[in-house]
Image: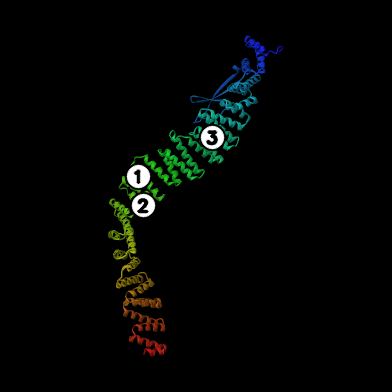
Amino acid sequence: NHLNDKAGAIESYERVCELLPEDGRPLVELHRLYAETESYEDLARVIEKQLELLGVGNAFTESREETEQNEEGMVGIVYGAKLVREDDVALWVDRSVSGIDPEEAIALWFELGEVYRLHLSEYDASVDCYDNILLIDIAHEGAIAGLEALLEAEVRVDTVARALSKVYATQEKYPELKSVLVRLGDVLPNVADKLSYYVCASQICSEYLEDGTGAIDCLARAMMSAPASEIVKQVLMDLAQRYEAWQKVIEIFEGVAKSISREENPELLTQYALELSSLWETQLDNRDKAIEYGRLGLEVGGADQEVLNYLKETFIRLESWEDVIGVLHAEAKLTEDDEVLLGINMQIASIQEASLGDNAGAIDTMLEVLEKHPENTDAMESLDRLYVACERWEEAVANCERRLELVEDQAARDEIECHMASILSEHLNESDRAFEIYSNILAHDPSHEMAISGLEVMLEKGEGAIVEQIAEILLPIYDANDAWQRRCWTDEQLLRVIVEPERRRDILHEEAMLYEQRGEEHEKAYEAYARSLKEDLRSQETIEQLFNYADVLGKWDELVGVMNEATVDADDVEAAKNIKCMVASIYREHLENLDAAIATYVEIREKDPEDLEILNALEELYREKEAWTELAEVL
């Protein structure tokens, strides 16, 4: 005080402290002197001695309380306490201070903490000082500010963040609380501890901040720390539903999936692939992405039958048929059972045919089936259909022949032979062989519809002698079944190939009779007779029937046309002349058209001017018309 010798004073007080170690008075002076001289190391030592004399060494008590854990080891957070794990037990360890002067202790700890932090860069020691203060005064602004500065400097983040969590929870500073909880999750080594803090931070965002994005981000950290956590995953899904944040959650899942090694953890990667496939499909309606992740699941987890079952259902639902086939091929690799393999290959062929339109691929698959199961009738039946679809006609016939070797039932054989015959006749130009097959079937079963239909197709398309051969088979069958309309239809097919006029006339007479007697279809009967006239101009039956129908149906005008047409280019000149005379007679007697009758006789006379019968007919008509000039010429 008088000599201004602070160094000497310090030396003297230090000597007193040595002599009187329990006396606090010299420490007070040393405290002041070291502060004034900025001797911070000595100042820190003196303050620590002061705290020791204050009794802080015995002021701390520790409590340990076991806490419940869920199946993944997560616990509910106790703010400010330290989580300790011993074997399978989780304990919250908390400290408290008692038995000392709180104001003096706080002042000393705060000054010591500031010295350590600001002057000595002993940050760990400063953390302890601030932490101790908050045990007494949770709202101490200086200690809080010091800890916040240390947290920003990444000093003992676990201790600092834990201490601040209690401060922020008490003060209801939820953004800051969320932040320190996340920091704790980031630095703690134990996975269950990390998840506990991340989940708690997420709850703070969701419940107090209404920050769905923040809540999801917290859980994203948890997912990256523990990709296998079903609890975190479910909480994340719940948040996605609540905040309609499926796109963000899917992005998180994708990030987690990319971090998983397929070599080290293929099962977990497969699980994520399947979940992503489902999310893309159900939540974002993105078929392509759903298929993409389904394929990843198949690639990584294709040796697991449950995975394959799930993927098969998914790809079927998405109508991604190539991928369904990929799943089936993977299933085939998991079994050596021939029957199971058979079923798989049949499914593959069915998809190739029905869903992909890949008939050639389906054929190849069915042929593989027959290599191992040469008597599999289902495969052969499928090949029948597939060969036809691919227009591979010779192979189709060969397949039918192979089927016939295995089938004993006559009805089944007949069906196969009909199929083969239709191919032979319609596509391989083997009508004779097809006719023989149909004929043999009808020989023992005259009512066989497929054989009858097959012959009818051949009859309608056929040319030449085979048409008559087919008719010989079909006509008795039609007669036996009173199918007179089909007989008429067959007659028409015969008329396409028969050239003899007499036979054509008789066929048309038969048609006319059937229409008249069985169907009472007089118009059609008349038409048949009209057509037959051209085949035989001398047929009295034809002429009589035409006159009868013309009279009954009032078809004299039409009959004139029929008869005139029949005489055009006729080879039988005399018969044509007689028909023309009949035409003239019809004009005179039934149509009362003398001019037309005269014109017809004149036409006849031009070809035979000396025919007396024609001249007499003209004389009679001219007299009736008083056509004297024309009469004179005739006379």
Specify whether 512 is left or right of 116: left
Say if 426 sits above or below 237 in the image.
below
Where's residue 71, x and y in %? 49, 31
Specify whether 523 is left or right of 98: left
Q: In this view of the protein, can residue 344 be seen by the observer?
A: yes
- Residue visible at 35% across and 43% down? 341
The one nearer the camera, 40 or 51, is 40
Specify whether 558 is left or right of 467: right
Quadrant that contains the N terminus: top right
Q: Amino acid at mark 2?
A: Leu
- Residue visible at 35% across and 74% down? 529
Q: Residues within 10 Å of mark 1 (few under 14, many from 20)?
A: many
Q: Which mark is residue 415?
A: none
Mark before the other along the chain sequence, 3 or 1? 3
Asked whether disc 3 touches disc 2, contact meaning CB atoms under 8 Å apart, the reply is: no
Element at badge 1? helix
Specify the farthest residue to the right.
Answer: 2
**Residue matched to label 2:** 386
Q: Amino acid at mark 3?
A: Leu
Viewer-nearest of discs 3 and 1: 3
Specify whether 262 is left or right of 66: left
**Residue matched to label 3:** 219
**Residue matched to label 1:** 342
The image's colouring method is rainbow
Where's residue 169, x and y in %? 61, 29
Mark before the other along the chain sequence, 1 or 2? 1
Specify the farthest residue to the top.
Answer: 19
Q: Amino acid at mark 1?
A: Leu
Asked whether disc 1 touches disc 2, contact meaning CB atoms under 8 Å apart, the reply is: no
